[in-house]
Image (tube, rainbow, N blue to C red):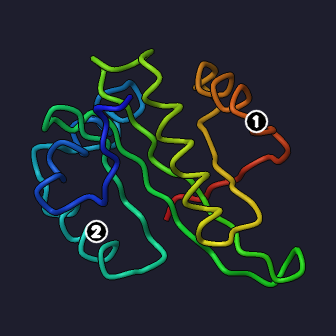
Amino acid sequence: MEDLEIRRATAEDIPAIVAMLADDPLGAQRESPDDLTPYLTAYQRLAADPNQHLVVAVRESRIVGTLQLTVIPGLSRRGSTRSIIEAVRVHADERGSGLGTRLIEWAIEESRRQRCQLVQLTSDVTRTDAHRFYERLGFAASHVGFKLSL
């Protein structure tokens, strides 16, 4: 993994990120790589917010992974700050290479640097391989998540 760089995403990275978001059965249903306009608008909001960390993993000048880390100050847990890991994706050519582990390790390290006391994430109930992956990295399936589409 020495040849891997994890860096903040730029607007130029958005097409590659969206392609990875769309490259799985769930993403294929909810992503639209043919129209990048909403993604670029969202990117501008993310880039302007210091608590948002949209990153890409780059190997040999090629984007091979991505995730979003959000830092949330809070009152619960004695005023703890927590982070949320979202939209973890690894390029199909890189799956099984250890890149996903490296991305999550980066997110945990950055969360510590940001003085977070808790790192959390959600994973779709159908992604059983991802559940095993997160548990192997020390995450516990301790809560039930709920979503409401608006």
Task: Provide the residue designation for mark 2.
Answer: 42
Q: Residue 140, image x and y in percent? A: 81, 38
Q: Quadrant of the N terminus?
A: top left
Q: Residue at x 14, y 47 (%)?
A: 15
- How would you rate the neighbour count of disc 1 (Cα within 10 Å): few for under 14, some for 14-19, many for 20 or more? few
- Marks 1 and 2, how far apart in space? 31 Å
Q: Quadrant of residue 96?
A: top left
User: Mark 1 vs mark 2: which is more N-terminal?
Assistant: 2
Q: Looking at this view, is 74 or 98 the one in front?
A: 98
Q: Residue 148, image x and y in percent? A: 60, 59
Q: Residue at x 31, y 36 (%)?
A: 4
Name of the residue lying farthest toward the front: 2
Q: Quadrant of residue 80?
A: bottom right
The three-letter code of the residue at mark 2 reads Ala
Q: Looking at this view, is 73 or 97 the one in front?
A: 97
Q: Residue at x 79, y 46 (%)?
A: 144
The three-letter code of the residue at mark 1 reads Gly
Disc nearest the viewer among 1 and 2: 1
Q: With respect to residue 131, does 44 lie above or below?
A: below
Q: Relative to residue 68, is residue 123 drawn left or right?
A: right
Q: Residue 11, image x and y in percent? A: 15, 62
Q: With respect to residue 130, does 30 lie above or below?
A: below
Disc on res. 49: none
Q: With respect to residue 49, does 55 lie above or below?
A: above
In what element is the residue under mark 2?
A: helix
Task: Provide the residue designation for mark 1.
Answer: 138
In what element is the residue under mark 1?
A: loop
Q: Relative to residue 62, is residue 149 drawn left or right?
A: right
Q: Residue at x 68, y 22 (%)?
A: 132
